[in-house]
């Protein structure tokens, strides 16, 4: 469905995020026919570039980061025609009058803050004082949204001085993934899952986001955050919320976010022995985490595994095991819902126990599979085996072109749909849960365990489940 004519101003329009994600996402939506040539996309950043030079920069970005560039060469010129540029100083006065002349409050206005969070206040203040942003204008902000509850509150307060909560779009690109939304369709659009979705039938849940890359290149920056702040507080928590939340009465932004917030509030403090932090070691050819971080005494984690609990009627007694890290065996993200084993087998000699496992894969091969128990084919009697019922989206939805996370999210901003964006109170509540955990290990001077690059993380992370008589799913 095409969106209304819009002006999108990308502050930080020459930066890495704009080049790798925002510009290619806009191009793809344009090629898909989602907006017309009357849209205006205005890069705004420090560099002194002309409009023509910015269009060249954007074209280079498309060449490098957009698979559609070659096959849609006809659309490239029309797309670039919509692009313009203003050289702007977020903290000064240069460029603001020029920006004002280029956008109109009569149209849908979106201001993408693809810059460091320390500039959010300055940008918001100037959009207001130069009367650039109309009453319905939207602002889009990126992670990291603070580094603890206090800084997140301060950022929320700064934005709230100039914008209403209904105008603020806090991006967590995990929420833009097709499978993540499918999780809601699966839970709330089928009869067969929801009745089983509780502590009577579910044994535990595993959420894994594994990366193969290290932090090389941005190690010094990463060293100030670590896996908890960089991944758990936002992405893993969002996944956990969607798995655990109660059904909202309707699929609308506040109804969904109210339910997510209740989950975050019900998360229990995590005991230190239920948290395992790790750092990758060096290999013969690759540096260690501490080398990459340029900090030989770094205590920051490049891996974390933890056992969490949600204290409510639905989930009491069901552990949620979360795990994420760098330089692991494979690039793989999965949510696995592991059902309880049958209490009794009627099949003599069956070596069970068998468990149904619903696995929601975010990458690679986005899709869902369900492990079910069937009879092994052949004349050998009733021998049972566990096999997957596989729904790989690429096959099931062949012919439909599913948009990538940034495409969907940017179009949702233009449409004014906040459902897949984090609300301010959600972000603060998430920090309220993570802060004491982080403060705890900092106060204890907890030293992360070393792990071998290409492994599944430190041995202790395996023990976290072994102690409970469970095991992690393979990272593959
Ligand atoms: P970057 O350093 O590549 O680009 C920063 C941009 O901000 C540049 O265009 C620069 O000109 C502009 N800028 C800096 N100071 C300015 C000023 N005073 N006035 C006007 N413009 C100014 O950064 P990035 O990697 O593109 O990241 C942008 C934001 O997005 C950051 O908050 C980052 O944490 C976040 N983010 C980035 C990624 C990513 O993949 N790069 C992913 C998630 C979140």
Image: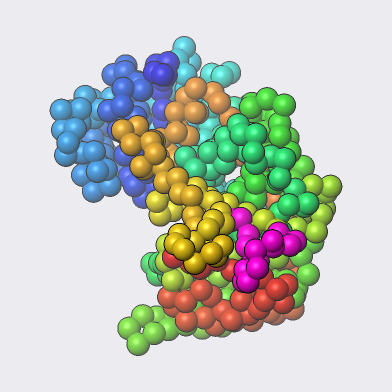
Secondary structure mostly seen in magenta is: loop
Quadrant where the C terminus lies?
bottom left
The residue that appears at 32% across and 83% down in the rendered structure is 285
In the rendered view, tell whether residue 337 sits above or below residue 274: above
Q: Nearer the viewer, residue 182 or 200?
A: 200
- x, y percentage for residue 158? 65, 39
Q: Residue at x 27, y 43 (%)?
A: 66
From the top left corner, tell me how far across and down residue 461 is, in percent.
62, 75
Residue 253: where, in percent of width, then height? 64, 29
Residue 230 in which image quadrant? bottom right
* Vertical comparison of 13 with 452: above or below: above
Please state the extent of the stretch shown in magenta in the rendering.
341-357
Mark count: 0
Q: Quadrant of the N terminus?
A: top left
Q: Residue at x 23, y 48 (%)?
A: 64
Say whether residue 413 is visible: yes
Q: Is 23 left or right of 371, judged from the image as shown?
A: left
User: Quarter of the image holding residue 340?
Assistant: bottom right
Could you tell whether 61 is left or right of 236 in the image? left
Q: Nearer the viewer, residue 153 or 22?
A: 22
Indicate the colouring scheme: rainbow
Query: Could you tell me if residue 401 is visible in this image?
Result: no
Residue found farthest to the bottom: 284
Asked if the magenta segment contains residue 307, the reply would be no
Locate residue 261 relative to residue 110 in the image: left or right.
right
Against 208, residue 449 (above or below) is below
Of residues 3 and 184, the one nearer the viewer is: 184
Tell me residue 235's x, y (percent): 57, 51
């Amino acid at each position: 469905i095409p969106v209304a004519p819009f002006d999108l101003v990308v502050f930080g329009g020459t930066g890495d995020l704009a080049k790798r994600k925002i510009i290619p996402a806009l191009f793809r939506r344009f090629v898909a026919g989602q907006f017309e040539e009357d849209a205006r996309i205005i890069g705004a950043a420090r560099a002194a570039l002309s409009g023509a030079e910015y269009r060249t920069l954007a074209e280079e970005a498309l060449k490098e980061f957009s698979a559609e560039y070659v096959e849609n060469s006809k659309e490239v010129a029309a797309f670039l025609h919509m692009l313009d540029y203003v050289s702007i100083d977020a903290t000064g006065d240069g460029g603001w009058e020029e920006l004002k002349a280029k956008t109109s409050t009569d149209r849908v206005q979106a201001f993408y803050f693809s810059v460091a969070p320390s500039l959010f206040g300055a940008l918001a203040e100037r959009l207001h004082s130069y009367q650039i942003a109309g009453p319905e204008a939207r602002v889009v902000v990126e992670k990291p949204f603070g580094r603890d509850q206090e800084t997140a509150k301060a950022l929320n307060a700064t934005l709230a001085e100039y914008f209403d909560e209904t105008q603020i779009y806090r991006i967590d690109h995990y929420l833009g993934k097709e499978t993540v939304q499918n999780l809601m369709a699966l839970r709330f659009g089928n009869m067969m899952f929801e009745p089983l979705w509780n502590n009577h039938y579910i044994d535990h849940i595993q959420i894994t986001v594994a990366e193969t890359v290290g932090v090389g290149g941005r190690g010094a920056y990463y060293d100030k955050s670590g896996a908890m702040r960089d991944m758990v507080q936002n992405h893993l928590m969002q996944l956990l919320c969607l798995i655990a939340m109660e059904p909202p009465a309707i699929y609308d932004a506040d109804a969904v976010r109210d339910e997510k917030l209740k989950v975050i509030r019900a998360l229990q403090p995590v005991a230190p022995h239920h948290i395992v932090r790790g750092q990758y070691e060096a290999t013969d050819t690759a540096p260690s985490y501490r080398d990459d971080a340029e900090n030989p005494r770094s205590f920051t984690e490049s891996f974390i595994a933890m056992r969490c609990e949600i204290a409510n009627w639905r989930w009491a007694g069901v552990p949620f095991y979360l795990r994420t890290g760098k330089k692991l065996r494979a690039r793989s993200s999965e949510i696995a819902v592991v059902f309880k084993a049958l209490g009794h087998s009627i099949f003599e000699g069956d070596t069970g126990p068998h468990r149904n496992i619903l696995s929601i894969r975010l990458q690679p091969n986005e899709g869902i599979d369900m492990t079910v128990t069937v009879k092994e084919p052949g004349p050998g009697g009733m021998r049972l085996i566990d096999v997957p019922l596989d729904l790989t989206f690429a096959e099931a939805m062949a012919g439909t072109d599913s948009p990538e996370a940034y495409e969907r999210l940017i179009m949702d901003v233009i449409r004014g749909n906040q459902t897949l964006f984090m609300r301010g109170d959600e972000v603060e509540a998430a920090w309220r849960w993570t802060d004491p955990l982080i403060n705890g290990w900092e106060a204890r001077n907890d030293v992360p365990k070393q792990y071998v690059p290409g492994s599944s993380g430190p041995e202790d992370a395996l023990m976290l489940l072994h102690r409970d008589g469970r095991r992690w799913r393979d990272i593959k």
